[in-house]
Image (tube, rainbow, N blue to C red):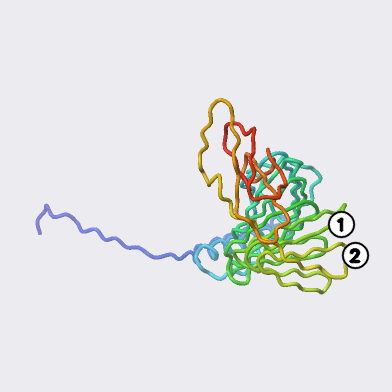
Amino acid sequence: MSSDSKPEIYVAWKTVTYRSVAMVAFAILLLMGIGLHFAFPQFSHKSVEAVGGLGKRLLDIFASSHGMPSKGGAQSAQQAHITALDGTVRVKKAGGNTWLTADYNIPLEKGDIVQTGSEGMAKIVFTDGTNYTVKQDSLIAIEENSANEQQQTNVAVAVSTGTVDLHTGGPPPGSKSQVMVAGATASLGPDSAARVHSDPKGDQHEILLEKGTGQVVRNGETVQLATWDKVAFQSASPRMAKLKEIGPPTPIAPANMMPIFMSKDSRPVEFSWTTMANAAGYRLRISRNPFFSSTVVDRKVNTADVVVSGLGEGAYYWL
């Protein structure tokens, strides 16, 4: 053999599974608990409970990350988040007594309360894609926000006062999207939209389905809703009244994103939309924000065409 030959290098390895790592970690924690039992018997019970709880959490983490079956609860709490804000919006956390100024960094959980001011608006988005737009002078509470091991979600919001627009996403089959108002519970199907209004002072409560499918349950009565169906009731009403609403007209002019050029002196702008059969009148609203938390024009008219003066430079939204 040549003296210049290099010695051979042998490389060996052993595969270690995540399950093995978790079990070793749990065993170490168990030994620590036994040691604490003999060293500090007066604290042994709490110590063993703490170690056992930590070990269980470790096992659950490894299980959820690598496809192992978890023995955790069937439901896990979720968080919702505010994605749009305007005006005065406050949040009271579950079990708390202090109102917080709402911002995008405050997570919303079960039991939290959201309140909007006279020109306030908040858009709340849940993990399943369901979103609730809380209009002015409204108060809502998050009644439920959870998901199970099959990723089926359960989202429910109670409207105490004011108006809420909600849109459901496309959650897995078996998921629930609900809204409660004055003892009535509305359940919406996937890809559905509704408007819920509650006026406790006037004792007027309404649920309008704008898109998709839904049903309303109250005092043992169940009403199925199709697009533009509405139920209305008062607190003492034995049954809900079901009505058919007329859908909104289609805007014609100004067209979406169409610029209007003006000289120094602003000129009138013509707004028009399709005529709706059997419509008693129309309502034109113009705002500087897409959520209409404040308006520059709010006018009831009898025709499908109206001229508006006094609009300054800037972007506008209308409906």
Looking at the image, the residue that sits furthest to the left is: 2
- Amino acid type, label 2: Ala
Residue placed under numbered mark 1 in the picture = 203
Tell me the SS state at disc 2: loop
Give x and y (percent) for residue 214: 68, 68
The answer to whether residue 237 is above or below residue 119 is below
Q: Distance between the residues labelled 2 and 1?
A: 9 Å
Quadrant position of residue 266: top right
Q: Do the residues labelled 2 and 1 touch (CB within 8 Å)?
A: yes
Q: Could you tell me which residue is drawn at 80 percent across and 55 percent down?
A: 198
Answer with mark 2 or mark 1, whichever residue precedes in sequence.
1
Examine the rendering and report whether any part of residue 67 can be seen.
yes
Residue 178's tag is none
Can you say which quadrant of the picture contains the N terminus? bottom left
Looking at the image, the residue that sits furthest to the right is 236
Tell which of 301 and 73 is nearer to you: 301
**Circle 2 residue:** 236
Q: How crowded is mark 2: few (under 14 residues within 10 Å), some or many (20 or more)?
A: few
**Residue at point 76%, 41% (across, down):** 118
Q: Which amino acid does label 1 sit on?
A: Asp
Can residue 37 be seen? no
123 or 261, which lies in front? 261
Q: Which is nearer the eye, 272 or 244?
A: 272
**Percent position of residue 42, x then y:** 76, 56
Question: In the shown orientation, is residue 125 left or right of residue 18?
Answer: right
Is 151 on the left or on the right of 14, as rendered? right
Secondary element at image label 1:
loop
Q: In this view, does 4 lie to the left or right of 91?
A: left
